[in-house]
Image (spheres, grey):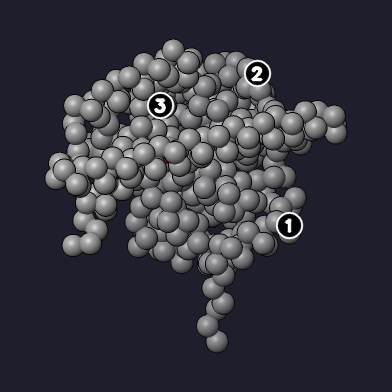
Amino acid sequence: MSKQRLTLQELELRMKFNNKESFFTKLRVKEQGPLIIAGPCSAESEAQVMLTAQALAKQDVHMFRAGIWKPRSRPNTFEGVGYKGLEWLSRVKQELGLKVTTEVANARHVEEALKYGIDALWIGARTTVNPFAVQEIADALQGVQVPVMVKNPINPDLALWIGALERIYNAGVTDLAAIHRGFSSYQKSKYRNVPVWQIPIELKARFQSLPIIVDPSHIAGNRDLIFAVSQKALDLGYDGVMIETHPDPENALSDAEQQVTPNALKDILERLQVRKTAYDDAELENRAEELRLQIDAADHDIIAALAKRMALVEQIGEYKKQNNVQVLQLERWKEIFRSRVEWAEEAGINPDFVAELYKLIHVESIRKQTQILNEDR
Ligand code: PEP
Ligand code: MN
């Protein structure tokens, strides 16, 4: 008889049912506080691993991370210490009582990590993109109960991320979490990997009981942005943070710019504000409800204004057709973009947002007029 394959929808149902029992939920000490995972990008030496872990064991850190097999862009750079690092992680677990986690990229990594009692595994962004590799890991996990965290794929493809979670879930792993580490982009940005927040938000919306952990180190690529990215994630209801921490970040063998010292981590964690998931009492909830009603009314006005605009666009479309004039009037559109952005500034709203909005309005206006021009032909 073939094994029943469950979908991630079914996973959600099941996780809702036993969410309180989930490995990741149980690790969180304070009911409201996030799950905290910290440790170096790479395990470099036994001394470095122990020194970092000793400092982190004194803080509110729940799990110690360290990469042992490092996926590097170029060969002949530091590719991790390999299997011997597992012994160091096992020492951290035994001597300091911290849970430990490392990245696995193939079946052999999984088998060895399990032999050394690694508490949780994570799948890296470069592995999530490859269904063959994820399936190989899933096959190695068949019949084993170990928590697994799946990082988002390097490209902004939600289906690929969900697919990897499903492959691992289908192997029988129910303690699953997602890690948001940002996405590669060819566009210049202040981030090493752009967050594209709507992708993890959509994941959260679809699988409400799947814990989501932010990895601000890989999103930021620079330690100065770690606090802001972490705070934003918590404000969006994320369940945890994974922050790369090294005793001497500047001299780290990988990801030197984005690691923080244990002291800096302490400072970041102290500054992070954990907000409540709901209002404390009915009166506060009522005030929010009043504001929501006003927002609804404002949105009605916006839709009505758009409908009016589109009706005018239709009229001008007819007029252009009668006079056999082309749809796109470049000078007019340049003027619209210039003036609307200016109006936005005067009204005190973000001009970039208004510029984006007008790009969408432009596309729709052109579509509408082109349709009119080609009707009855
Ligand atoms: C890491 O966590 O050090 C790592 C290699 O991450 P990612 O897979 O997100 O690049
Ligand atoms: Mn790293």
Question: Going 30% across and 25% down the picture, which residue do you hit?
Answer: 337
Amino acid carrying label 3: it is Val
Q: Which residue is mark 2?
A: 270
Disc 3, ligand 1: is the CB inside 8 Å? no
Q: Is residue 282 left or right of residue 238?
A: right
Q: Rounded to the nearest whole Å, what is the CA distance between mark 1 and mark 2?
A: 31 Å
Residue 354's disc number: 3
Question: Going 50% across and 62% down the picture, which residue do you hit?
Answer: 166
Q: Is residue 376 above or below residue 301?
A: below
Question: Going 70% across and 56% down the picture, which residue do you hit?
Answer: 16
Amino acid carrying label 2: it is Glu
Could you classify mark 2 by the number of other residues whose Cα lies within 10 Å: few (under 14), some (14-19), or many (20 or more)? few
Question: Going 31% across and 48% down the picture, which residue do you hit?
Answer: 368
Q: Which residue is mark 1?
A: 18
Q: Rounded to the nearest whole Å, what is the CA distance between mark 3 and mark 2?
A: 36 Å
Judge by depth and name the residue closer to the eye, 347 or 319: 319
Q: Secondary structure at mark 1?
A: helix
Q: What is the x, y in percent for residue 258?
A: 41, 24
